[in-house]
Image: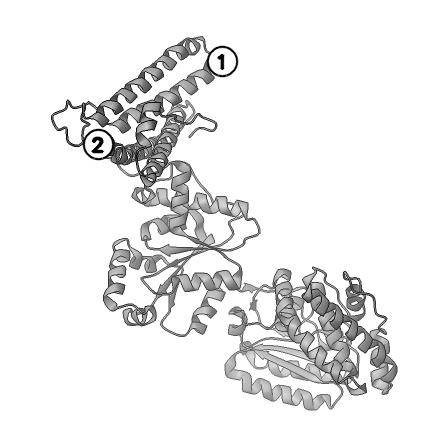
Amino acid sequence: MTQNSPPLVLPSGLARALAALQDKDRRRLDDTVTRLHTVNGRLWDTEDRVRGALLSTAQVADCKREIDQLNAERNTLAERADEVLGTLADAGCAAAPLHTETLASVVDRLSVLTLRIWHSERTAVRDEVARRRVPALLGQREELRAALDSLVSDVVTGHRRLPTPARFKLYGRDDAVPTEIKPSRHLRRVLAFGGLSECGKSTSAEFVRRMCGAQRLKIGFLLRQAAHREGLADPYTLSARRQAGLMLGELNRFAEHHVDTRLFTIESVHDDASIAELKQLMGDRLQVVYLDASFAVRVERSGMQAPAVAAKDEIKMSRGAHQVAALADHVIDNSGSITALRARLRRIATPPAPTTLHVATPYGLGLPAAVASATADFTDAVRAYGPGVQLAALTGSPGEGTWIAGWSDLDLLVIADHEITGRIHEAVHEYRRALNGAASLGPTLVTPGELTARRLTPRLAFALYQLQQGQPALHTAPGIELPTITRDELALAAIHELPQVILTMRRLRADAGPDTLRQLYKHLVLACRLLLREHGQWEVGPDRILSAASRMPGLTAAPVPSLAEISSAWRDGDTELALKPVTAAVDQLLAWYATQLAA
């Protein structure tokens, strides 16, 4: 309805008669009449628009289709209103004279007259003819309200009969959205889940919501919202194209009010025609996911009897649910394990992207000559294995330029196919032998599938993030695809990882001694790094991390020696002096952490 147009006010006699109805009938009638008035307002606007002199033939045709659809809605709503209004009549007076129209028809006329008065009053400001017409229109409305009250009185007392309310109107359905609608720039990605009964649609959507931060919506909810907003009686009677336009409009509206939401899911896709139209409107922003499973599997999982599942299938198939598979972007066989399902869903929800990484030789990482030489030999060995090895990198301090001989470890990350893990282990064994105790080697071997399914530990996610931020790798395969790691994900991962770090640090503190200095210090730095991530702060290097952490609310600065001083004391075996300030800082952090959680 036109913005700021007046509401429809029913005459007092009709209002009193309606007061005798049950609450649910009054609510139903109020909703229906409000929608009818809204549709009449939209009809007025569309009929005004179609008269525009600059409209093309195609635009005129679109407006005509919209007018036809709104007229169909108008008649449907009038029939619904008569279903309630007809109950006011005294059914026992079959011999009473028959009136020419139903009560809803008069209400519809009153709605149009209300709009005509409002538009005439607006035009009267600049049009003398319209100004003179307004008093006559106001008089017509008072006469119509009085006539409606009189008719209601006659109907209730049995002095007048009403005609059959069915209008039997025939309207074609539109084949195009009346006005072009495009996805909002905030509507980045939508997954639409389809499939037959008990195939796993809801389970899949909930997993994507929980693990990927998606906003979960139902197609029925979107259509009902659109119907309520636009005064439509039954959105399911609209053409597939119109339904798609309504759904996209609601998705756009939701996305524009939740601009931080990057992923939406919609379920359940039971109409192949409307989802095909929505796909045409949205393109690749919409990914249709069809979940397939045999009837026996679905019955077993549902806990229902086979006939009940078959009955639900029949309803869905009558709407075209089984035909969604033919137009789906992804068809998932959900007869297997939940692990396989979730891995596939993660790849679809957050697909890996081609990644360009910085590659450097081991001699450019600031490593001692012997360590760099052993690292170069390892790199050559895994490179010779071909495309089965996608990446090899030293993460952590070598990439940060803070590696210290005799103190720092070599954290090795290798991404390789499962079939060659045995050969990778042989290469790691030879790498460790070549180091000859010059450094401690900590290898991490993962498969590409683990990464694209985002089965990542917090430390692995951080290593990938560092590589994507420019830390060098030793070797990468052409066209390597990695999951994109965001700071928000790392901040969330920090919340999950910190408890284990605190527990380990508390155990190390209980056994604190010269031999535990290195582990205790590293866990102190790691705990502070994770706490800073939770606070949205990103520091590199132990000294900067400890300094920044000491400024957190309620945490007093503890004088911890620099990394250079502590590492030197460790190498020289003179750990007593360094251990005391480190344990004091650990005690202070543990006490602060306990206080924060107790609060």
Q: Which residue is mark 1?
A: 125
For residue 572, which quarter of the picture? bottom right
Give percent across and percent down for residue 50.
38, 26
Name the residue: 54% across, 53% down.
Answer: 261
Q: Position of residue 137 (x, y in %)?
A: 37, 14
Q: Relative to 582, is 226 above or below?
A: above
Task: Tell whether 299 sits left or right of 337.
Answer: left
**What is the secondary structure assignment of the residue under circle 1?**
loop
| Badge 2: residue crowd in 10 Å (few <14, some 14–19, many ≥20) | some
Q: Which mark is residue 395?
A: none
**In this picture, residue 125 sits left or right of residue 580:** left
Q: Is residue 212 above or below residue 113?
A: below
**Which colour style is shown?**
one colour
Q: Earlier in the sequence, mark 1 or mark 2?
A: 1
Q: Which disc is residue 165 wearing? A: 2
Q: Work out how far the residue at label 1 is from the one at label 2, CA to CA, in angstroms.
A: 40 Å
Q: Amino acid at mark 2?
A: Pro
Residue 183's spot in the image, x, y percent?
A: 48, 46
Circles 1, 2 touching at the beta carbon (< 8 Å)? no
Q: Quadrant of the N terminus?
A: top left
Instruction: Tell me which corner region of the image, top left, top right, bottom left or bottom right, holds residue 297.
Output: bottom left
Looking at the image, can residue 58 be seen?
no
**Element on which disc 2 rests:** loop
The spot of residue 300 in percent (x, y) is: 31, 72
Q: Amino acid at mark 1?
A: Val
